[in-house]
Every structure is written in C-alpha cells, then in structure tokens.
Amino acid sequence: MSGWRVRIDADRCSGIGMCEALAPDVLEVGDDGRVHARRDGFADGLRDQVEGAVRSCPTRSLRVVPEHKTV
Ligand code: SF4
C-alpha cells in the first residue's frame, strides 16, 4: 500500500472549499479560512478523490506527493 500526502500552499488558498467538498476524508477548511489536511497521509484508495480536489482548486494550492517526500 502506497502512502501519499497532500501538500498545501496556504498562502494561495482562498478558502472557498471546493477541495473539501471533493475530498472530505482528507481536506477541511478551518476557522482561519484556509484549507488543512485532516490526516498526515492517505492510502491509494483515497488518491482519486484527492487528485480531483487538486484539479478543481482554482488557486492551484494543492499537490499530491509521496508520503516520505520531505521537499
Ligand atoms: S479549493 Fe483550493 S483555494 Fe479552495 S479551499 Fe481548497 S485549497 Fe483552498
């Protein structure tokens, strides 16, 4: 089972929440109006929904990276 992580550029996020609607298991918009990861990593079974969120983000604030990648 591969592990993935979503990388968030919080400075670009406008907080509208399209990503949260598409990947509610992994992403949520916080009280600060920015998106946050609900978990540190996720498995292959959630990758399609997260990739959909990445594609739908109007500010291109999201990326999926392997969980072990640090940069
Ligand atoms: S879709 Fe993009 S801009 Fe909107 S809340 Fe999610 S990360 Fe932020």
Image (tube, helix red, strand yellow):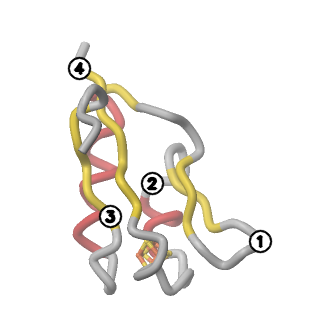
Q: Are marks 1 and 4 in contact (CB under 8 Å)?
A: no
Q: Which label sits on residue 2?
A: 4
Q: Which label sits on residue 62?
A: 3
Q: Sequence order check: which comes first, mark 2 or mark 1?
A: 2
Q: Quadrant of the C terminus?
A: top left
Specify the quarter for ligand 1: bottom left
The amino acid type, in three-letter code, at marker 1 is Asp
What residue is rendered at 33% in x and 84% in y? Answer: 59
The amino acid type, in three-letter code, at marker 4 is Ser
Tell how many labels: 4
Report the residue marked by disc 2.
23
Q: Which label sits on residue 8?
A: none
Report the residue marked by disc 1.
31
Determine whether the beta carbon of the residue marked 3 sits less than 8 angstroms from the nearest atom of ligand 1: yes
Q: Residue placed farthest to the top in the image?
A: 1
SS category of the residue bearing label 2: loop
Q: Sequence order check: which comes first, mark 4 or mark 2?
A: 4
